[in-house]
Image (tube, rainbow, N blue to C red):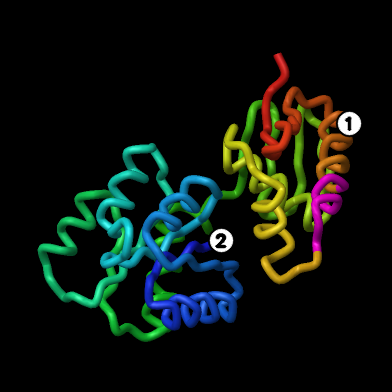
Amino acid sequence: MYILVIEDEKRLADALVQILKEARYQAEAVYNGEDGYRMALKNSYDLILLDVMLPMMDGFSIVRELRGNHLTTPVIMLTARDDVSDKIHGLDYGADDYITKPFVAGELLARIRALSRRHGEYNTEELCFGDLTLHLNSDDISCHGKTMHLAYKEYELMKLFMSSGKTILSKEMLINRIWGNDSDAEDNNVEVYISFLRKKLAFLGSKATLVSIRKVGYRLEEKA
């Protein structure tokens, strides 16, 4: 799971990222509302932790604009004010949950797990795109009766592309998601694995293909 933390208290934001990484999530932080909103639209996150009181763009405006752009990424809002009206506003604008500061790490992680279950992370056994089926319990991919096993990074890449629909995914985002923010992976690592996947899709006879979008990234598409 890849989590975006939007929190202007830098020490708290960095502490949250560390807590999430120790819980084996991938996470990154931004420290103002405008950057947070831009990152949420640009990248494909599984969850957003969103502070209410932010410089440049407040949390209510962010979640409202994200939902207005049809982004369905789950959002947990963070606030230092235990005000029922704030919670109502946040939920009405499209937040999925609300947690009041200060909170303990265990409560936050439990809420993340609960929200993930509600969004089907642990219940889905397959992902489908066109004529492709990715089997989440075996790391296999199948098409027209043929099945191939994917190596770990191939599987993670394919899962990301299939769950992102026709969204363009940048090389930077793919490196962060698959290799991690602290890795030494470079663009050519992505290119090699994209080549592996293209060969496997061709072997399966799938109409799906990974298309290069010049200077932007890659997108999964179906050939006519």
Which label belongs to residue 59?
none
139, 71: nearer the viewer:
71
Q: Which residues are magenta?
A: 185-192
Looking at the rendered structure, the kind of residue marked 1 is: Phe
Which of disc 2 and disc 1 is earlier in sequence?
2
Judge whether residue 153 is colored magenta. no
Residue 174 placed where, x, y %? 69, 52
**Which residue lies at the image location 84% right of the left edge and 45% below the top edge?**
191
Q: Position of 201 compared to 220: left or right?
A: right
Between disc 1 and disc 2, the foreground one is 2
Q: Which residue is mark 1?
A: 203
Task: Give residue 126's position: percent from left, percent from top.
Answer: 62, 44
Image quarter of residue 186: bottom right
Along the line of sight, the residue nearer the viewer: 69 or 92: 69
Mark 1 residue crowding within 10 angstroms, few (<14) / some (14–19) / many (20+)? few
The numbered dot on residue 2 is 2
Q: Residue at x 33, y 67 (%)?
A: 51
Which type of secondary structure does the marked residue at label 1 adopt? helix
